[in-house]
């Protein structure tokens, strides 16, 4: 019994600490399916509770069910669980609860989280293999310089009159440095990695990192398109829920969670309070918001149909995003292979040149 309770406690703790995108998609999608078939909200929550194997979701739906049975709203129940549902979830659901069409917003939430997860997974998968390849290659090269090449260069020292080629002397100096200063090198790598983690955890560091990404070809197109689509899709949902512009852009700041966008969204919220246009301020940030997007926003403001303008932004950039991610996944691997093979060729030339010189010296 003790072992069973320990395992159950560990699984419950794991599910609660890892409850995020996948579980939220499942929750909103299941709720949408049930509401679509005119199942009551309380019965829908109870059904999800009875059919899920996730301990966190089971506990969440149990609490939501208790609130709803005591005549509380779904938004009220989600608001009481901030560790699982953010302000965006609560506000959107609250805005639709009195429209008698809660299923629409639940479907929208599941679709948005599904889209985000799909794009993130595609982006990560496009970079995972090259990163692994780089790490393995760096480790192999360091091992080669630290353990293999010194033995070969020791043989060359037995022939003091033999002149080593310049490329071999260069490799020999690197190898000697890694052997003699290995502790210093490892400490330096660890310190730099630790320092970068600290720097990029700050708002300033994240802005610098984001600016760097925006300066890299292809990566800036993917990154900019991703955040434009995310901003536009969420903005459209909130505008369709008849939320006011100030509230929409205030929530967008928290949803994007990118310090570089904070001044833009803060300015938009402040100018709206002064009855200025969104277009006037967004056009000042053309490095983040392209002129195509600001032109669509200008049209949307003039026609009082800003939601449709954001839908057009999504349509324009979504296909480009998918195409660029697919292209990156295909191109980045051969580029990495060319770089790695270039290093291997340089090392091979230096080593074989030494071997040939040693063979000539022995024959003499």
Image (cartoon, helix red, strand yellow):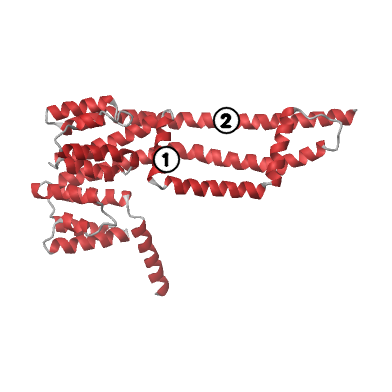
Which sits in the foreground, 202 or 86? 202
Which quadrant of the structure image shows residue 218? Answer: top left
Pick whichever of labels 2 and 1 is earlier in the sequence.
1
Q: Quadrant of the C terminus?
A: top right
Q: Residue at x 25, y 42 (%)?
A: 252
Seen in the picture, residue 127 relative to 96 is either above or below; the reply is above
Which percent across, then down, holds residue 226?
Answer: 33, 35
What's the CA distance linking mark 2 and mark 1? 21 Å
Q: Residue at x 78, y 31 (%)?
A: 354
SS for callout 1: helix
Which percent across, then down, holds residue 206?
Answer: 40, 42
Q: Residue at x 18, y 49 (%)?
A: 91
Which percent across, then down, holds residue 157?
Answer: 82, 37
SS for callout 2: helix
Mark identifier at residue 124: 1
Residue found at the very far bottom of the displayed protein? 1
Seen in the picture, residue 266 relative to 87 is either above or below; the reply is above
Q: Residue at x 31, y 60 (%)?
A: 56
Horizontally, residue 298 falls left or right of residue 156, namely left
Mark identifier at residue 190: none
Which quadrant of the structure image shows residue 48? Answer: bottom left
Which sits in the foreground, 271 or 159? 271
Q: How many marks?
A: 2
Which percent across, then down, holds residue 65?
Answer: 18, 61
Which sits in the foreground, 195 or 361? 195
Instruction: Give the labeled residue for mark 2.
Output: 339
Horizontally, residue 265 falls left or right of residue 38, namely right
Seen in the picture, residue 37 relative to 215 is either above or below; the reply is below
Q: Quadrant of the N terminus?
A: bottom left
């Amino acid at each position: 019994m003790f072992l069973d309770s320990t395992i159950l406690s560990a699984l419950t703790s794991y599910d609660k600490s890892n409850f995020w995108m996948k579980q939220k998609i499942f929750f909103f999608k299941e709720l949408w399916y049930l509401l679509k078939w005119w199942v009551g909200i309380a019965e829908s929550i109870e059904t999800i509770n009875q059919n899920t194997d996730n301990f966190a979701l089971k506990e969440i739906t149990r609490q939501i069910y208790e609130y709803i049975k005591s005549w509380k709203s779904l938004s009220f129940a989600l608001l009481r669980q901030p560790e699982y549902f953010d302000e965006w979830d609560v506000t959107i659901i609250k805005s639709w609860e009195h429209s008698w069409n809660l299923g629409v917003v639940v479907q929208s939430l599941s679709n948005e989280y599904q889209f985000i997860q799909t794009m993130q997974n595609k982006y990560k998968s496009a970079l995972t293999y090259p990163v692994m390849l780089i790490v393995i290659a760096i480790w192999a090269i360091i091992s080669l310089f630290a353990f293999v090449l010194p033995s070969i260069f020791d043989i060359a020292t037995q022939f003091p009159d033999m002149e080593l080629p310049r490329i071999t002397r260069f490799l020999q100096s690197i190898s000697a440095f890694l052997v003699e200063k290995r502790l210093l090198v490892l400490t330096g790598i660890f310190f730099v990695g630790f320092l970068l983690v600290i720097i990029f955890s700050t708002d300033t560091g994240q802005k610098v990192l984001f600016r760097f990404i925006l300066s890299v070809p292809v990566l800036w197109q993917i990154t900019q398109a991703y955040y434009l689509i995310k901003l536009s899709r969420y903005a459209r949902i909130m505008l369709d829920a008849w939320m006011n512009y100030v509230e929409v852009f205030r929530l967008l700041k928290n949803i994007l969670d990118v310090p570089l966008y904070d001044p833009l969204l803060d300015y938009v919220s402040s100018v709206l309070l002064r009855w200025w246009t969104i277009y006037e301020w967004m056009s000042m940030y053309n490095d983040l918001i392209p002129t195509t997007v600001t032109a669509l926003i200008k049209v949307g403001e003039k026609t009082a149909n800003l939601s449709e303008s954001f839908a057009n932004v999504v349509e324009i950039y979504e296909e480009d995003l998918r195409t660029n991610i697919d292209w990156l996944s295909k191109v980045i691997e051969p580029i990495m292979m060319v770089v790695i093979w270039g290093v291997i060729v340089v090392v091979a030339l230096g080593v074989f040149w030494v071997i040939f010189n040693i063979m000539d010296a022995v024959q003499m």
